[in-house]
Amino acid sequence: MNSMRQITRAAELQSLPLFRDFIKAACKGRADIDDQTCYDLQLAVDEACTNIITHGYAGMNPGSIILALELGRSQVVVNLTDFGHPFEPSRAPMPDVEAGLEDRPIGGFGLFFIYQTMDEIRYQTTEDGNCLTFIKLLSSSERA
Amino acid sequence: MFQYLRVKRQIEKVVPDTGALTQEQLTQDPGIPITLRQINALPENAKKRVYRSLLPPELLGFYGIDPITWNGANGEPAVQMVAEAQTGSLKISVARQGEPEDPFICIELSDNSFNGIDLNLLLLNDPDSPSFHTEVDEAGRPTLFGTARRNLTEELRAMQAGLAPAQVRKSLGASRLVLQQLDVFFSILGHRAYFLEPLTYASAWVFERRGFAYVRGHKLMDDIHKEFQPGGKLNQALDCSTPFRMPEQWNTVRGRAWAIQDGILEVLDEKWDKFRMVKQVGRHAGVETFPGAVY
């Protein structure tokens, strides 16, 4: 049986700790979700929300971010919905991880982290909002 | 390592905004949304069949109105529908016998430029409650719900009677029922969401409770809540300078709403004009910008 939880907060940086705490609370009590997985989910949501806050709602009075978590037996599905300007992850440039420290621009690693830690990412923008979905397979199903 | 990155922009959902609905369109993918303009191009009775789903039968029945014919107990029409062909707007109003100019339910919808639909007006008045003429000023000019001009005398009477800004009568208490019905209507049309601009702080709060999120203004609602707390800028501006800015107003929805109607947001360099809300059909967003609020 999948368990669905949701939290909606304003798209502002002060909401990030609330989203992190929400994920932590959701993962707590699930023996099959280890600390590393929980941390990966927190990091991915943190980075994605930062993009929504700084780019998606840029130039407007910020609206909502809806974070929905679906904790299944074999995977965790994260849905982030916002109503700002669409921000397609595939269009963002990937950082050059081979470059020397002095040659790297500041920032740009958020999406890289998401891609590194999540198993599937989808982005959909329609007239009713933008929805970014991450799927994280739980380790037992990865082994299967 | 991620395995898939799928970016999908649903351009196939974009629908033409002209022409009538055809049988072909009705039989294609039911996920493709239908516009009001398309419905309005249908014959009158076909339009009525579709728009009938906007009004909760239970509510009409309570007032003795037939939910199928829309006639009152006397057999006379009680529901007026304005849905002109070549337009993307709809107005449905419900009035009691002999009071066509004083509807107690009014719903106005229009297509927007993003293939969505806006709820422009939702009026739910208790027809048996006393009325307050806040809709016109002392010179008889429309106040446009207090947004263009104000009738301070009537507003004060309305506030003292427990009404919120922009109300001319006590609420019908049917917003949950009507908004649930709107979800049904929009799902029939294939829309996953609809939008509105709340007229007042009190209406934004009601729409939050009914499951709406914010396209714009969520942070400002949080700021308003914060600044109404003791020591906050809005709290300090409740300085008795007008009857709408009394100190005790900080801790109720209506109290805050009247102070905002009176322009108190100027202390934050803001106005009540930056808000847009969205309801995702079948989903309650769970927004609560005034936790534990007293209405």
Image (spheres, coloured by chain):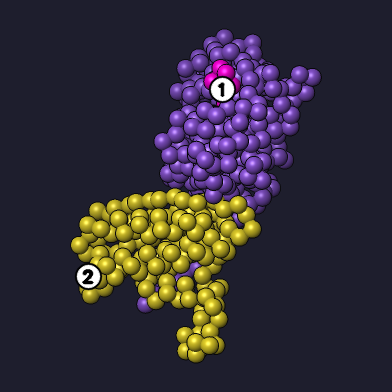
> What shade has chain B been given?
purple
Q: Is residue B191 visible?
A: no
Magenta stretch, residue numbers? B159-164
Disc 2 residue crowd, few under 14, some 14–19, many 20+, Cα 10 Å: few
**Residue at 48% from the left image edge and 76% from the top image edge:** A109
Residue at the right extreme? B139
Does mark 2 fall on the same chain as mark 1?
no
**Residue at 45% from the left image edge and 30% from the top image edge:** B294
B80 and A3: which one is in front? A3
- Given the image, what chain letter belongs to the residue carrying mark 2? A
Using the image, determine if residue B281 lies above or below residue B13: above
Q: Quadrant of the N terminus of chain B?
A: bottom left
Q: Is residue B163 magenta?
A: yes
Disc 1 residue crowd, few under 14, some 14–19, many 20+, Cα 10 Å: many
- Element type at mark 1: loop
Q: Position of residue B76 (x, y in %)?
A: 61, 13
A68 and A2: which one is in front? A68
- Element type at mark 2: helix
Q: Is residue A101 left or right of residue A69?
A: right
> What shade has chain A been given?
yellow
Quarter-of-image position of residue B243: top right
Q: Amino acid at mark 1?
A: Leu
Q: CA distance from mark 1 to mark 2?
A: 58 Å
Using the image, determine if residue B12 lies above or below residue B230: below
Q: Which residue is mark 2?
A: A140
Q: Which residue is mark 1?
A: B163
Q: Position of residue B185 (x, y in %)?
A: 51, 37
Q: Amino acid at mark 2?
A: Ser
Closest to the camera, between mark 1 and mark 2, is: 1
Q: Is residue B285 magenta?
A: no
Q: Is residue B143 left or right of residue B199?
A: right
- Given the image, what chain letter belongs to the residue carrying mark 1? B
